[in-house]
């Protein structure tokens, strides 16, 4: 059985850093950035027998908007619906469930999130972003 907990004291930061540093969205991310992101987000860990097997976080003002980020499931735990379960946990959380907008980004899990009500932007022409030069270069080089 996999337990979900938002107790930050249980997070295995070294493991989370390794996962995120190997991801397509934050390759090589520095540990201090991961620690700062954890400190400033509502984090969720997934645990099997005390070992962390998943992670996700929400960045939110708890009134109007949340961004769900860094959804990660360790390879041996994939294919069991854990990523969807972690996102659903946030969608059901009393501080998040009534927000006007909840967003996320994905390159490869559209079906997972569509099943939870996420869809492509209705007005993409209204959204803009500002990227650090190294992030822009990475994104331009990615397939």
Image (tube, rainbow, N blue to C red):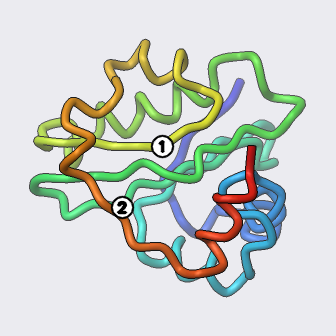
Secondary structure beneath label 1 = loop
Nearer the observer, 14 or 136: 136
Q: Would residue 36 appear left or right of 52 to someone viewing this image?
A: left
Give percent across and percent down for residue 103. 33, 43
Pair 1/2: label in front = 1
Give percent across and percent down for residue 91. 31, 33
Crowding near pointer 2: few (<14 within 10 Å), some, many (20+)?
some
* Residue drawn at 63 percent across, 18 percent down: 81
Point out the residue furthest to the right here: 76
Q: Would residue 139 appear left or right of 115 to someone viewing this image?
A: right
Secondary structure beneath label 2 = strand
Quadrant of res 53: top right
Quadrant of res 1: top right
Q: Mark 2 points at which residue?
A: 59
* Residue drawn at 53 percent across, 47 percent down: 5
Q: Do the residues labelled 1 and 2 touch (CB within 8 Å)?
A: no
Choose the circle earlier in sequence order: 1 or 2.
2
Tally the numbered discs.
Answer: 2
Q: In this view, does 98 lie above or below 84?
A: below
* Residue drawn at 64 percent across, 62 percent down: 10
* Residue drawn at 48 percent across, 73 percent down: 131
Tell me the tag on residue 3. none
Tell me the tag on residue 105. 1
Crowding near pointer 1: few (<14 within 10 Å), some, many (20+)?
some
Nearer the observer, 24 or 71: 24
Q: Is residue 137 above or below residue 98?
A: below
Question: What is the spatial separation of the Cα atoms under label 1 and label 2, in whole angstroms?
Answer: 13 Å
Q: In this view, does 98 lie above or below 139?
A: above
């Amino acid at each position: 059985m996999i337990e979900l907990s938002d107790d930050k004291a249980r997070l295995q930061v070294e493991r989370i850093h390794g996962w995120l540093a190997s991801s397509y969205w934050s390759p090589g991310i520095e540990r201090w950035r991961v620690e700062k992101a954890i400190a400033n987000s509502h984090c969720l860990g997934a645990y099997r027998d005390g070992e962390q097997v998943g992670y996700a976080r929400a960045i939110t003002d708890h009134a109007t908007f949340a961004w769900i980020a860094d959804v990660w499931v360790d390879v041996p735990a994939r294919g069991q619906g854990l990523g969807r379960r972690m996102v659903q946990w946030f969608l059901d959380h009393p501080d998040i469930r009534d927000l006007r907008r909840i967003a996320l980004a994905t390159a490869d899990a559209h079906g997972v999130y569509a099943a939870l009500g996420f869809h492509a932007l209705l007005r993409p022409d209204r959204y803009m972003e500002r990227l650090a030069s190294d992030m822009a270069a990475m994104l331009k080089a990615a397939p």
